[in-house]
Image: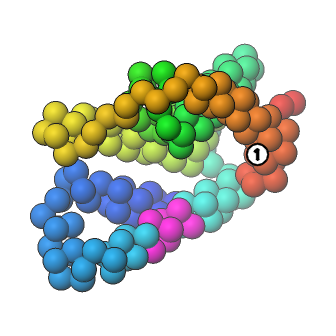
Amino acid sequence: MALLVAGLVLFLVTHLVRPFAPGLRTAGIATLGKPAWMVLHGVASLASLVMIVYGFIEARDTGGELLYTPPAFMAHITLTLMLIASICLVAGFLPAGHIRQKLKFPILVAIKIWALAHLLANGETYSVLVFITILAWAVVLRITLKKRIAAGETALPVFVSAKHDLVSIVLGAALYVAIVFWLHEWLIGVRPLP
């Protein structure tokens, strides 16, 4: 589980530099130039994700302590929450409809729902570690974004059209179906449906 923990630490360090160490980011950009800094940040981010994936697989294969046993009905709640998360995720990549405008940062909302939903359905130590870490990161990032909005550093999405809500729902539902029936088992090795 050491690789998983190292990957999560690297993920947090690379993804919380801007809110917690803006001076380090500024100094890095001044020294390396913005393109080189972005490449370095991208490589570190990708490395953290690879470490998390391989660390998770390694921890799952060696078994982990069960912290809690989720009731069977939690699987249904998780599946429902994941439909909502899929719609939010798609909405975050489209021009603003009502969904994106109301949620402000729908991709972060999708990540928080995803992490919470998976905490409801998984009680192994390695699963809980990953999902709590990602949930905590998304919450902290949302708080820092709220501060950046108040300071005028980040602009909120401006409403464009309600048709983007319809597209979000349709594409989000299609993504959800693909994940539930094919992608989750193919990528993760676990079938969401019994």
Image quadrant of residue 179? top right
Q: Is residue 27 above or below residue 76?
A: below
Identity of the residue drawn at 57% across and 67% down: 50
Instruction: Using residue 112 as the reference point, say whether residue 27 is left or right of it.
Output: left
Callout 1 environment at 10 Å: few (<14), some (14 to 19), or many (20+)? some
Q: Is residue 145 above or below residue 76?
A: below
Place of residue 134 in the rendered image (x, y in percent of width and height, measured from the top left): 45, 44
User: What residue lies at 26% left-to-right and 59% top-to-bottom?
Assistant: 17
User: Residue at horizontal 87%, vertical 30%?
Assistant: 194
Q: With 112 as the anchor, is 26 left or right in this view?
A: left
Q: Is residue 13 visible?
A: yes
Is 178 inside the magenta-drawn segment? no
Instruction: Name the residue carrying label 1.
Output: 184
Where in the figure is residue 12, as x and y percent of width and height? 36, 56
Q: Position of residue 36 (x, y in %)?
A: 33, 80
Name the residue type under label 1: His
User: Which range is magenta?
Assistant: 43-50
Looking at the picture, how far across and down is residue 156, in whole percent? 32, 34
Magenta stretch holds residue 48: yes
User: Depth check: 52 or 172 in front?
Assistant: 172
